[in-house]
Image (cartoon, helix red, strand yellow):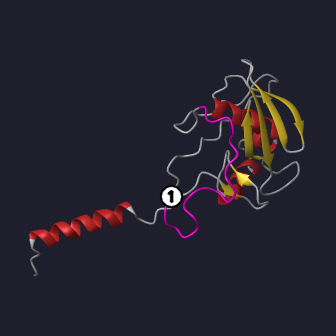
Amino acid sequence: MTVLKPGRTMALLLLAGLLAGCGGSDQQTAPAPAPPAAPSTTATATPSPEPSAGATPGPTSATPRAGGGSGGSGGAGGGGGAHEGRSGATLLWPVTDPAEVAPLQARVDGGAQPWLLDPAEVAVAFAGATYGWGAPEAGSVSGGTVVVNDAAGGRATVTVVQPGRTGATGIWVVSAASRS
């Protein structure tokens, strides 16, 4: 058995620690807000999103840079917070990775979270989770743009897309938002 000198042992431990810290993990550094539970069928109810560390009121614009976040495609660095979906649109909420779209669509097809089939409900849930609004309401809906209003006077324009299946049975995902 070869005995390492104390200096070499320390260098090996330091190298092992650095390699472990820079490991090839491609996970996000901050988890995306969990999709809220399905809303009740009453007209005034809105989904109650689960609070998370990333669900605090943010900047007035939630439009990310084109091409997703930091980290690139080589597996090095951290994963970005948003990625481009099948349609080329950036995905912000409730999923950020195109690979998450099909499993979420399958869960909705199985009866879970039916509110994801309604662009207005998705926009309302996003505004509540992202901006901390207690009772947001959908105003006008035009194509993939939903205006959401808060009782305290807040207003957000939320863009939603269908990154997988389109039509009445396809889920909606937020791709951009701005608050005024």
Residue type pointed to by label 1? Gly
Between 110 and 179, the residue placed more toward the observer is: 179
Nearest the eye: 23 or 44: 23
Q: Quadrant of the C terminus?
A: top right
| Apparent side of residue 125 relative to residue 140 in the rendered image (left or right) | left
Q: Is residue 35 visible?
A: yes
The one of 162 and 91 positioned closer to us in this rendering: 91
Residue matched to label 1: 78
The residue carrying pointer 1 sits among few (fewer than 14), some (14 to 19) or many (20 or more) residues within 10 Å by Cα, namely: some
Question: For residue 97, which quarter of the picture?
Answer: bottom right
Residue 59: give x, y in percent of width and height: 63, 36
Q: Against 134, is 84 above or below? A: below
Residue 2 forms part of the magenta stretch: no
The segment highlighted magenta reads 57-78
- Could you tell whether 87 is left or right of 128 in the image? right
Q: What's the residue at 34%, 66% (across, down)? A: 19
Q: Is residue 38 visible?
A: no
